[in-house]
Amino acid sequence: MKGYVDKSACIGCGMCADTAPEAFRIGEDGLAEGYQEIPADSIDNAKEAEADCPVGAIQVK
Ligand code: SF4
């Protein structure tokens, strides 16, 4: 599984990178990105970030 961020919606709040650092990071543009295949033990955190993103910009699939 991997995290996908709609950068046109992301507001760069950083929550996803705090909640699931193995799935998301803040890029040089100040917006989040999914950057690697999510390790199995971090999928729950990634799903939590997906659910909690304030603008609904995340998909984990
Ligand atoms: S939680 Fe949502 S709005 Fe915040 S940085 Fe992540 S993708 Fe962007």
Image (tube, grey):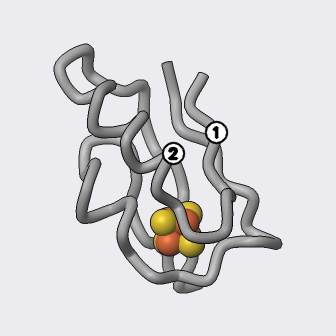
Tell me what residue is drawn at x 49 percent, y 18 percent. Answer: 1
Q: Residue furthest right?
A: 8
Residue 32 visible? The answer is no
Graded by Cα atoms within 10 Å as few (under 14), some (14 to 19) or many (20 or more), the crowding at tag 1 reads some
Q: What is the number of the mark on residue 32?
A: none
Instruction: Locate residue 9, reporting x and y percent.
Output: 76, 71
> On the picture, is 7 further left or further right than 44?
right
- How much space separates mark 2 and mark 1, taking CA atoms? 6 Å
Q: Secondary structure at mark 2?
A: helix
Graded by Cα atoms within 10 Å as few (under 14), some (14 to 19) or many (20 or more), the crowding at tag 2 reads many
Mark 1: which amino acid? Gln
Instruction: Locate residue 49, reporting x and y percent.
Output: 41, 50
Residues 28 and 20: in front is: 20
Q: Secondary structure at mark 1?
A: strand
Tell me what residue is drawn at x 39 percent, y 75 percent. Answer: 14
**Mark with earlier residue (2, 1):** 2
Q: Is residue 16 above or below residue 48?
A: below
Which residue in the protein does label 2 denote? Answer: 50
Mark 2: which amino acid? Glu
Tell me what residue is drawn at x 42 percent, y 34 percent. Answer: 47
Q: Residue furthest left?
A: 41
Q: What is the number of the mark on residue 59?
A: 1
Tell me what residue is drawn at x 29 percent, y 27 percent. Answer: 44
Residue 30 visible? The answer is yes
Q: Is residue 41 above or below residue 8?
A: above
Tag 2–tag 1 contact (CB < 8 Å): yes
